């Protein structure tokens, strides 16, 4: 074997090694993708039983399902709106065991055995809740998208005041909260109305509060 043959062999060996190395570097992502596709974990489901608007409901849900999606997509109660889906607008407010919550921020599986009330459960067109009547009377809505959350929040908020639960606007942590505009506005601040019907909403809430005082 002469020197030219050695150079040729070395070049051939170099190319083979280079090709193998390149293949080794390039293949793992594909191999990894195939392995991942073959081993994708199935969603974990759980049976959830709770009461919604006075009716017992049992659902088999992906444990990642929010209460909002359980209500809208599985129970078809679309009165509860999906707005920001980040707990910032209040459009998805429902009442859970007497307390108002943002249903987009909580998982359905966290409410096993709970009693959930949505806007559909507060009243019907033939038998409106007093807060619904007041919103209509005072024109407490414009586009209406935030209205279900506003009404559910307002109903639960008045119960908070009656129970003596303070807010940031309360002058005392131990004294009974006063039913004044500043107190109501602070407590309702988590419900945003893009149409700006806040003064009408306040009038509706005050009327209901005075009737039940």
Image: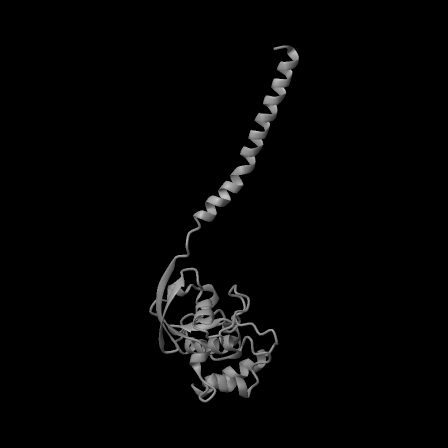
Number of labels in the image equals 0
> Which quarter of the figure is the N terminus placed in?
top right
Q: Is residue 206 visible?
A: yes
Q: Quadrant of residue 42?
A: bottom left
Residue 50, relative to residue 212: is it above or below? above
Residue 202 vs residue 115, the one in the foreground: 115
Q: Is residue 144 left or right of residue 160?
A: right
| Front in this rendered view, residue 17 or 160 | 17
From the viewer's perspective, is 181 left or right of 12? left
- Asked if one can make out residue 171 in the rendered structure from this viewpoint, the answer is no
Q: Is residue 84 above or below residue 204?
A: above
Q: Residue furthest right?
A: 4
Q: Tell me, what colour scheme is on the image? A: one colour
Q: Position of residue 144 (x, y in %)?
A: 56, 78
Residue visible at 55% across and 66% down in the picture: 84
User: Residue 145 occupies which quadrant of the picture?
Assistant: bottom right
Residue found farthest to the top: 2
Q: Is residue 113 left or right of residue 103?
A: left
The image position of residue 141, as x and y in percent, is 57, 81
The quadrant in which the C terminus is found is bottom left
What residue is shown at x 43% (from left), y 86% (from top)? 212
Residue drawn at 46 percent across, 67 percent down: 69
Asked which quadrant contains residue 63, the reply is: bottom left
Picture coordinates of residue 132 (x, y %)? Answer: 49, 84
Which residue appears at 40% of the width and 64% of the height? 61
x then y, percent, for residue 25: 55, 34
Q: Relative to the observer, which residue lies in front, 191 or 180?
A: 191
Furthest toward the front, the residue is 1
């Amino acid at each position: 074997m002469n020197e030219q043959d050695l150079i040729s062999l070395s070049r051939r060996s170099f190319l083979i090694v280079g090709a193998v190395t390149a293949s080794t570097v390039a293949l793992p992502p594909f191999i990894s993708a195939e392995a991942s596709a073959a081993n994708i974990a199935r969603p974990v489901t759980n049976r959830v039983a709770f009461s919604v608007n006075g009716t017992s409901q049992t659902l088999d849900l992906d444990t990642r399902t929010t209460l909002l999606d359980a209500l809208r997509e599985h129970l078809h109660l679309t009165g509860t709106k999906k707005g920001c889906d980040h707990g910032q607008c209040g459009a998805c407010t429902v009442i859970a065991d007497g307390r108002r919550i943002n249903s987009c921020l909580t998982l359905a599986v966290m409410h096993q055995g709970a009693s959930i009330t949505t806007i559909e459960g507060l009243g019907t067109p033939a038998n409106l809740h007093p807060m619904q009547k007041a919103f209509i009377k005072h024109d407490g809505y414009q586009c209406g998208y935030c209205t279900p959350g506003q009404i559910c929040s307002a109903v639960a908020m008045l119960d908070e005041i009656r129970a003596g639960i303070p807010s940031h606007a309360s002058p005392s942590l131990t004294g009974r909260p006063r039913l004044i505009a500043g107190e109501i506005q602070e407590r309702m601040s988590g419900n945003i109305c893009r149409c700006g019907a806040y003064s009408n909403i306040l009038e509706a809430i005050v009327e209901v509060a005075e009737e039940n005082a």
